Amino acid sequence: MASHNAVHNTVRGSSGVYKLQALDRAFAVLDLLAGSNTALGLAEIAEALGLHKSTAHRFLMVLERHRMAERTQSGKFRLGLRLCEFGSRAIEQFDLRDRAQLHLKLLVAEVEETAHLCILEKTHMVYIDKQEPERSIRMISRVGASSPVHCTAVGKAMLATMPRARVEALLPDLVLEQFTRRTMTSREALLKELERTSRRGYAVDDEEREEGVRCAGVAILDGRGEAIAAVSISGPSFRVTMQKIPAIAGKLMSCVRDIQHDLGYVPLTR
């Protein structure tokens, strides 16, 4: 109890503002490392955050000690593996995953293809759950992995629910990387596809992320009609044909309605 009071008094006392500012700066360092495709040097980090090198170095030493940042052989810094542990724990504790799991299992039993539950993280969809059928050919995907929004059914399903202005605000940050010959690499093509997705109520990944894999995706909406996640059904394109997509999407939309009902967002209607 004494130690708790000491900590509490420290935060409320004269040094409290500094400690909170230090936390903000530590998270700013992590955000900077997370947003870079390559490891960053001390000078780059200090300049980007407007810090003295000695100050940036102190933050990096603390983050390194707690394995939230790590140093490469060249002396540069990148995110540490402990963040993966935190991420895995966060996913395990995420209420949405628990509530959706039974519905995903029922969906997979019905369509006999793989289901994914994903959330949006900046410009990528992160897989927080995966349910597989009892089939010999399965999807090579894993919980915790991520894929860009522009070439995935779950990503396009979420984008299609957003106001046009919000989507256009995201576009400058989107790297429209080409993964297959079918991947959309122009903003105009993506915006047209989002309009089609909005009209029909589901998105399609027609071998855009991976050759030979086709997916349908539907967004999960909260009580305000905003997308909080998305569910997809994926399978080999020879099984998940374009002719079968509307029927699969119908079952997918029914599953999403059940999930929304269990989360208390909308009344269950059929």
Image (cartoon, rainbow, N blue to C red):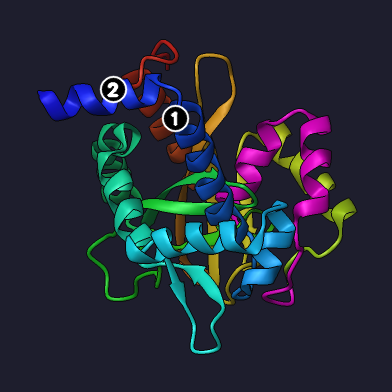
Q: Position of residue 128 (x, y in %)?
A: 37, 50
Q: Can you tell which mark lies on residue 102?
A: none
Whether residue 207 is visible, yes or no, is yes
Q: Earlier in the sequence, mark 2 or mark 1?
A: 2
Residue 124 placed where, x, y %?
59, 54
153 in the magenta segment: yes
Q: Is residue 147 left or right of residue 116?
A: right
Which residue position is annotated with label 1?
15
Q: Report the front residue among 167 and 215.
A: 167
Image point (72%, 52%), residue name: 50
Q: Amino acid at mark 2?
A: His
Please tell me which residue is depicted at 67% across the width and 75% down the height of the picture: 179
Q: Is residue 104 rendered to the left or right of residue 147?
A: left
Tell whether label 1 touches label 2 (CB within 8 Å).
no
- Mark 2 and mark 1: Cα distance apart in space: 11 Å
Instruction: Look at mark 2 in the image and give the residue it sits on.
Output: 8
